[in-house]
Image (tube, helix red, strand yellow):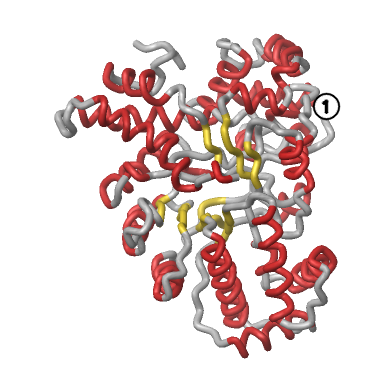
Amino acid sequence: MKNFLDQDFLLNTKTAQRLYHEYASELPIIDYHCHLPPDQIAEDVKFENLTRIWLYGDHYKWRAMRANGVNEEYITGNKTDQEKFEKWAATVPYTLRNPLYHWTHLELQRYFGINELLSPATAQKIYADCNAKLQTPEFSVRGILKSKNVEVVCTTDDPLDNLAYHQQIKQDGFSVKVLPAFRPDKAMNADDLNALNTYIDQLEVVANVSVSNFDDYLKALKARHDYFAANGCQLSDHGLEQIYAEDYTDSEIAAIFLKIRNKQALLPLEILKFKSAMLVHFALWDHEKGWVQQFHLGALRNNNTRGLTNSGPDTGWDSIGDFKQGVALSKFLNRLDLDNQLAKTILYNLNPADNELMASMTGNFNDGSVAGKVQFGSAWWFLDQKDGMTKQLNALSNIGLISRMVGMLTDSRSFLSFPRHEYFRRLVCNLFAEDIENGELPNDLEWTGKIIQDICYYNAKNYFNFDKQ
């Protein structure tokens, strides 16, 4: 019987152990999509206690606590940080076979050197030991990033953001590149006219452009796109239920935009046309600048009205959606490819039923200009665990080239999430090793090790080309 979370965790053969320890374990991390707050990096924050760095903003843990019968006062409510931590510690033993059990103990080991299991019996000591370490220089935000060998971090930023914190980080000469990513979801949200008009009003101020028609709107958003590029941005990101690819004319979109500004109710088809037009313009700007565009598709958000009202969005009320993805996605990518204006693209699905669809769709638009130009992105959100990641890797292997994959990302708001890269790397090594052990791949560890290094680091390094920043 293997020991829990030993040095060969998830590595089930000697071949897997060699591949991981000799080829993958020491590689730097390029975290090209996350939700880390750039202000905390700029200010090199030291967190007061383990709750603040570990539980604040982590809706994965919040969902588990709710499922375990914990009152909301101990989750997003007004209980003390120590009381909240104790409720989490009491929940952890009940997370067996949930990825949170692995992540929790990996993070305690990798950051704090704690090998004890978290439970009510160990909570007080673990909390005190971690809190003491968090006050040392090595556990400032920048210290954590450097200690985990992080090379690049790409945050997720609204077009209205002034990027002042990114500028400060660069001016400080911090060794880790911290770059913005352009996330314009709010700019196309025609489902909520009040929110969209408020957004447009704010855009006018930030871009110093008066917006009275759709051309003005594009001009203002393009100015923000240019501003992000001037501040090191090389990626966009879109979090959508599905791709929108309705046919439209310029005159239709101009008329729809006037309705938006006049707060006149839009027909469902008009909403789809407006979103479709916005996606095309964003994609053309991305191609023009040589950016990578990312599409996170399939989340059914804000399912619980009472929870949303009490706690707000992104607090654990979302789930996997069953939206149809194929036809519109094909139409959208093909429209851009027809004029050779399709940027490098990464597609992420939240519904595992779409794995093979996404893996096959990427192959339709790889044109030989760039290795892996259109990528099937790593397993995301509810799927970034052992089963979900393995299924994604197998689908990509069977239908595309896993050897050209740009690897893992944290997609996290927590500075303690970087062991997710380790988790991914261990799974990749184990998959290749299993095939070698079964005689399904040649026993050539040098070449296989190179492919694994590419997947874990070098493909991303070459694909994004962050070195030019």
Residue placed at 49% from the left, 32% from the top? 421
Q: Label 1: state its secondary structure.
A: loop
Residue 53 visible at all: yes
Describe residue 158's horizontal placement relative to residue 330 as left or right.
right
User: Which image quadrant for residue 123?
Assistant: top right
- The residue pinned by badge 1 equals 80
- Residue 309 sits in which quadrant? bottom right
Residue 72 in sight here: no
Query: Is 70 located above or below residue 185 in the figure?
Result: above
Q: Is residue 319 above or below residue 434?
A: below
Q: Looking at this rendering, what residue extends furthest in the front direction? A: 468
| Label 1: few (<14), some (14–19) or many (≥20) C-alpha neighbours in 10 Å | few
Residue 1 x %, y %: 34, 11
Answer with left or right where residue 386 lies relative to residue 59: left
Residue at 61%, 44% in the rendered image: 154
Residue at image coords 17%, 30%: 442
| 242 over 82 or under it: above or below | below
Give the quadrant of the C terminus: top right
User: Which amino acid does the dot numbered 1 rest on?
Assistant: Thr
